[in-house]
Image (spheres, rainbow, N blue to C red):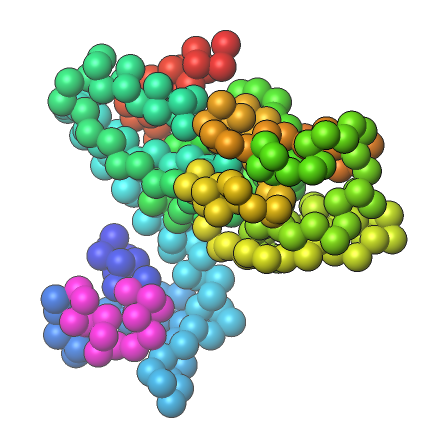
Amino acid sequence: METRDIEYILAVERCGGIGRAAESLGITQPALTKAVQRVEAQVGLPLFERTANGMSTTHAGRHFIERARRIQLEYEDALKEMQGIRTGELGVLRLGYSPSLPNAIVLDACRQLLRERPVARLKLRRRLARDLMDLLAAGELDIAVAPVPRQATDILAIEELFDDRLVVVADETHPLQQRRNLSLADLCGQEWLLPEGHIVLRQQVDEAFRRQGLPPPAMRVEVDFGTASLFALVRGTPMLSVSSGHAEAGLPGLKPLDVGLEALDLRRRIGVVTRAGAYLSPLAQRMAALLREQVG
């Protein structure tokens, strides 16, 4: 089997049909059909079956695709490593980071890296933690700075950086700012800006209310993305939201409410996350070192 055969199989799975895959690869449909048949003959099982909408993977095909992706990523890592040996520390660093982190931690490290490596280039992605983990697993990121996943996985390698705690924030003139030792019952009936229900943070908040037999937070605004600019929606309103305890300086007009850990425990660990066993370029290694220095 040639490496291009793996590329062909992955293209058929991704495009859902021979025609679309052949067009994306720039080859003829007969050539691609022969490549698929060649691989199926080698593995001894059909990998695809025809459907009304094109082609879908068989049970065996799904297992083969999963391993083929790993093989392709390993091959790409090998090429990157050879390129790094040939060019030294030149290249591109693909860095992702969570919007719930203080910008300074990541961006200060980026500035230092750019000063040290005048010809290096950065590609930054600011995404929710779950999206970052998917991008890492797919080989689309070299390194991510994000909350450490709650469940261990052999796909990702994690180096913990620091402890963080999310806090409930409100406008500095909100009546609850005058009260101390707030309980979740004190927050009932308030309007909230929070992520959508499939996001871990929202699930943590909902579960805390549920454990105490309280109705879930009353949602005024739900979002499927994260950015500090969203807090402009909270400023000057009675809404509550949740922010990193390290980000208070970057939230003008907002202040944390005095909600104790016994009421809402949103502690977490922040870490540098990479794909387990992946090649880390000198740029990626230096970025990890700079991040350690930032939180040191």
Residue at 42 percent across and 18 percent down: it is 291
Q: Position of residue 153 (x, y in %)?
A: 58, 41
- Where residue 35 sits, quadrant-wise, is bottom left
Above or below — where is 286 with respect to 81?
Answer: above
| Residue 59: in magenta span | no
Residue 278 at least partly seen? no
Extent of the magenta region: 11-25
Residue at 50 percent across and 54 percent down: it is 223
Residue at 33 percent across and 74 percent down: it is 16
Considering depth in this image, is 269 or 87 the residue closer to the camera?
Answer: 269
Considering depth in this image, is 174 or 55 the residue closer to the camera?
Answer: 174
Q: Position of residue 294 (x, y in %)?
A: 44, 14
Above or below — where is 164 with respect to 44?
Answer: above
In this image, 81 relative to 45: left or right? left
Q: Position of residue 215 (x, y in %)?
A: 79, 57
In this image, 8 relative to 242: left or right? left
Q: Position of residue 281 (x, y in %)?
A: 30, 26
